[in-house]
Amino acid sequence: MNTDFSEKILSWYKINGRKKLPWKVKDPYKIWISEVMLQQTQVNTVIPYYNKFVASYPDLKSLSKASLDDLMLLWSGLGYYRRIKNIHLASQIITEKYNNKFPRNFDDILSLPGIGRTTASAISTFSGYSKRAILDGNVKRILRRYYNISHDNSSKTEKILWDKSTLVTPLTKTSQFIQAMMDIGSLICKRSKPNCSMCPLKEMKCLYTDEVKKISTIKKNTKKINMYLLTIINNKNQIYLKKIKSGTLWENLYSGPFFYTTLKMNSWLREKNLLNIKTMNKFQINHRVTNKEIKIINHVYFLKNDKNVSFSTENWYNLAEINVGIPKYLDKALEVYRSEYEKNNVQKIEKRG
């Protein structure tokens, strides 16, 4: 065990560590929810979602009764929606197999949907069930830099990283140590522009030199996508939404129709007798998902009393209070729509005056 390494990390945590996070409890259920939310998502983003979630579903029993649509609504905007589907599925397994009690055995925790080795280790350690090393993105970054480990994602490199994480993780104050590593990774040893002068390991033999910095940054290829969104609103201030099909990025959320070519968009508009109806507004929003940059052209249609338009009656939702989960891009689009709508109304009133 590298005791010098762990002592430096624990000393930093004693003074600087984030000790008052809302999930700093011994309840494995709440730790599980927080750990899943924190997968690929920053702490400050997670906190309001976590608080709202546990207020609505304070324990496994209440969660087991929730529908996926209810959970998707709470998760709406947090992204990576497979996580909430796995939580829903795991809650059903826990109900049936463990009588609504979160499993204590590590292998049982690891077997639940959406839980990998790091998440299972964090849940087990923070709950006081065992003492285990973790290897989330923050810990990986610290170890890669400190030991100058290859930035490839091969199984060989993964094993080296797990071995190093196990080596530096102490058997006492283990939970404080892994929390400190996550804190240092997100606050100091950041992906870009790490603040090495503030690092507790700066006086040790960290191999993250200026020369290493030049070759260690991996640029991810960003895929650029055009998307055409239809925001359709009727004279009852209702918006037309349909559940997004499975197998897509936003499956099980609700959205207005969207297409990746104007040809398919126009075909759908023609089918619904909307092609010749003038759009109320058209604007662009930019949305980023992992390594994708999506340019969304939003076409807003306002339907008055056009009887020729073909729509199902059950797909309309109150625009003032949408009670289903929607993707972040639609949230952005509706923000723009509302601001434009209010601005246009003010201009009309001023003209009348």
Image (spheres, helix red, strand yellow):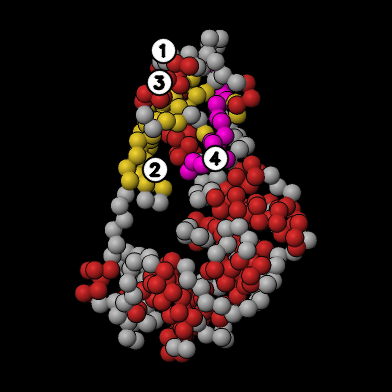
User: Which mark is drawn over residue 287?
Assistant: 2
Between circles 2 and 3, the one closer to the viewer is 3
Distance from disc 3 to disc 4, alpha carbons, whole Å, reads 23 Å
Distance from disc 1 to disc 4, alpha carbons, whole Å, reads 31 Å
Q: Amino acid at mark 4?
A: Ser
* Residue at which label 1 appears: 276
Between circles 4 and 2, the one closer to the viewer is 4
* Residue at which label 3 appears: 266
Q: Amino acid at mark 3?
A: Asn
Q: Based on the picture, tell me whether residue 250 belongs to the magenta stretch.
A: yes
Q: Amino acid at mark 1?
A: Asn
Q: Is residue 89 left or right of residue 174?
A: right
Q: Based on the picture, tell me whether residue 86 belongs to the magenta stretch.
A: no
Question: SS class of the residue under badge 3?
Answer: helix
Q: Main secondary structure of the magenta part?
A: loop
User: Which mark is drawn over residue 65?
Assistant: none
State which tag comes first along the sequence, 1 or 4: 4
Q: Position of residue 300 (x, y in %)?
A: 44, 25
Task: Give the position of the C terminus as an image quadrant.
Answer: top left
Q: Quadrant of residue 87?
A: bottom right
